[in-house]
């Protein structure tokens, strides 16, 4: 069996790859593994389960709840809420396990399962590995001690989760949003109720799009992966800014008043300066990834803020933040982590804090985001190559060295092997888009010939 857990839980086509049987079995295994780790010691275990609006989430939620309860875990269902809400409530309510059913920005047929440990943090890799091992043991017939009578888990609905999470969001805002007009694109996803409620309670005038989930339309032509509707709506309504989430609302992208997109790097830049000003940017450091735009790095250097870069993936950003005590980090894709207030990327919180900065300064989002200039970035996927040799090929190394000499200080080259496919990703940044395209194309040709 290949590894079930990816960088963000278990995902696949619902009822094909991700079946009710798999969801139930993984939930039982998770309960057993956490029990063995001592998480439940001295008390009756509890879990909190949430989901996004996908139709498949309904039966997968039932399977997860059944698995946990059959293993003796009491379950609180919070219904449709964003991933960061489930993480927050897991910590706030003292639950031993949090479970979120979502495939984030993926299309509707997909779904996923993500487990949170006590406190609302993602499970460590070794615990995920152990869950897979125990799941496989159970699947192949190894018996396990099943509680009976009063030992089985009880299931309740926690309807207060919505208000508690919204109150948390409002409570951590540095200032209100009175006087701002904001368009919100909810991707017909998990934040369709939460985000408009939070922005409205904070004082903003709001216009919503993509806020009518029916179980089938999540991420369909809207949200952070399809910004066209939001750009048009912001201009049409004369709004100050627009905020776009993905299906589970763990990411946030924005649009300024002119309809120009503001990406995760720019959002991080704006928030970094705001947090330094308020004394909350610990060690004057922000964490990004190797895919962070060079323009972001140059802007932070100019402003006297250190940038620490990690491997691609918000879990690696979070690991660095926790290990070194940093307060802010994120990705170009819009996963932004404000560790004082969230244990994972929180798109609604990010959007609120960005809007709060606009309201507090009286400056436009375009002006604030102008602290950094995005350098043109070209990404080419080179398929059907021996990706294992990308770091050892002399021919590839020579081509990269030549490209770096050509680009100088205002550009860079990054070659990354895919973690799931037989391909190499060639990324080139340059001061000029045509130069970036030309250099990326030349490098892609070398990778194909040398590794194909």
Image (cartoon, rainbow, N blue to C red):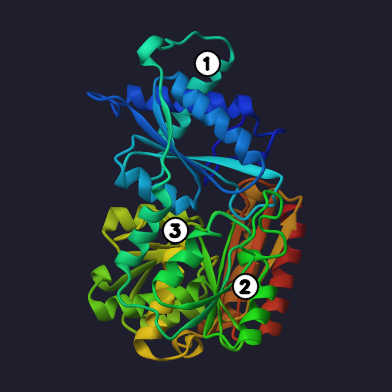
Q: Is residue 44 above or below residue 384?
A: above
Q: Is residue 311 above or below residue 99?
A: below
Q: What x and y, as percent, mark residue 394?
A: 63, 59
The residue pinned by badge 1 equals 137
Q: Is residue 19 above or below residue 282?
A: above
Q: How many marks?
A: 3
Q: Residue at x 50, y 24 (%)?
A: 67
Mark 2 nearby-residue class (10 Å; few <14, some 14–19, many ≥20): many
Mark 3 nearby-residue class (10 Å; few <14, some 14–19, many ≥20): many
- Does the image show residue 143? yes
Q: Residue at x 25, y 24 (%)?
A: 41
Q: Residue at x 30, y 66 (%)?
A: 172
Mark 1 nearby-residue class (10 Å; few <14, some 14–19, many ≥20): some
- The residue mark sitting in front, 1 or 2, is 1
**Dividing the image into 4 quarters, which one contains the N terminus?**
top right
Marks 2 and 3, how far apart in space? 27 Å
Q: Secondary structure at mark 2?
A: strand
Q: What x and y, as percent, mark residue 85?
A: 43, 52
Q: What x and y, as percent, mark residue 6?
A: 55, 42
Is residue 366 shown left or right of residue 282?
right
- The residue mark sitting in front, 1 or 3, is 3
Q: Nearer the viewer, residue 103 or 375?
A: 103
Earlier-in-chain disc, 2 versus 3: 3
Q: Residue at x 40, y 70 (%)?
A: 201
Q: Nearer the viewer, residue 207 or 323?
A: 207
The residue pinned by badge 3 equals 345
In the figure, residue 435 lies in which quadrant?
bottom right
The residue pinned by badge 2 equals 428
Asked if disc 1 and disc 2 are in contact, CB closer than 8 Å, the reply is: no
Is residue 165 shown left or right of residue 440?
left
């Amino acid at each position: 069996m290949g590894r079930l857990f990816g960088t963000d839980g278990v995902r696949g086509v619902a009822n094909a790859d991700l079946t009710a049987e798999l969801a139930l079995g993984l939930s039982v295994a998770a309960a057993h593994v956490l029990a063995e780790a001592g998480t439940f010691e001295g008390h009756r275990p509890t879990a909190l389960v949430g989901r996004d609006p996908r139709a498949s989430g309904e039966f997968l939620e039932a399977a997860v709840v059944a698995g946990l309860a059959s293993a003796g875990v009491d379950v609180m269902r919070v219904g449709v809420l964003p991933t960061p809400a489930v993480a927050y409530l897991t910590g706030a309510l003292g639950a031993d396990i949090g479970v979120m059913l979502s495939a984030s920005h993926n299309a509707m047929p997909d779904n996923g399962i993500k487990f949170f440990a006590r406190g609302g943090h993602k499970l460590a890799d070794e615990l995920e590995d152990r869950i897979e091992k125990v799941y496989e043991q159970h699947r192949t017939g190894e018996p396990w001690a099943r509680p009976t009578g009063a030992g089985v888990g009880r299931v309740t609905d926690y309807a207060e989760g919505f208000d508690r999470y919204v109150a948390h969001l409002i409570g951590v805002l540095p200032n209100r949003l009175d006087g701002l007009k904001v368009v919100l694109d909810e991707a017909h996803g998990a934040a369709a109720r939460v985000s408009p409620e939070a922005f409205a309670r904070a004082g903003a005038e709001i216009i919503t799009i993509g806020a009518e989930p029916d179980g089938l339309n999540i991420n369909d032509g809207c949200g952070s992966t399809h910004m066209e509707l939001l750009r048009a709506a912001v201009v049409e309504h004369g709004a100050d800014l627009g905020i776009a989430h993905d299906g589970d609302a763990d990411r946030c992208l924005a649009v300024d008043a002119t309809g120009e997109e503001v990406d995760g790097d720019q959002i991080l830049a704006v928030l970094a300066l705001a947090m330094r000003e308020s004394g909350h940017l610990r060690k004057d450091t922000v964490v990004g990834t190797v895919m962070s735009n060079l323009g972001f790095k140059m802007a932070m250097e100019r402003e006297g803020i250190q940038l620490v870069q990690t491997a691609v993936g918000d879990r690696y950003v979070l690991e660095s933040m926790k290990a070194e005590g940093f307060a802010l980090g994120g990705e170009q894709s819009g996963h932004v982590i404000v560790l004082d207030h969230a244990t994972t990327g929180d798109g609604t919180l990010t959007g609120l804090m960005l809007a709060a900065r606009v309201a507090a300064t009286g400056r436009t989002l375009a002006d604030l985001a102008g602290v950094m200039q995005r350098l043109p970035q070209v990404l080419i996927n080179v398929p059907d190559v021996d990706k294992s040799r990308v770091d050892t090929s002399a021919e590839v190394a020579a081509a990269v060295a030549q490209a770096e000499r050509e680009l100088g200080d205002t550009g860079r080259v990054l070659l990354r092997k895919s973690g799931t496919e037989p391909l190499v990703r060639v990324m080139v940044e340059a001061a000029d888009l045509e130069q970036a395209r030309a250099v990326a194309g030349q490098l892609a040709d070398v990778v194909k010939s040398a590794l194909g």
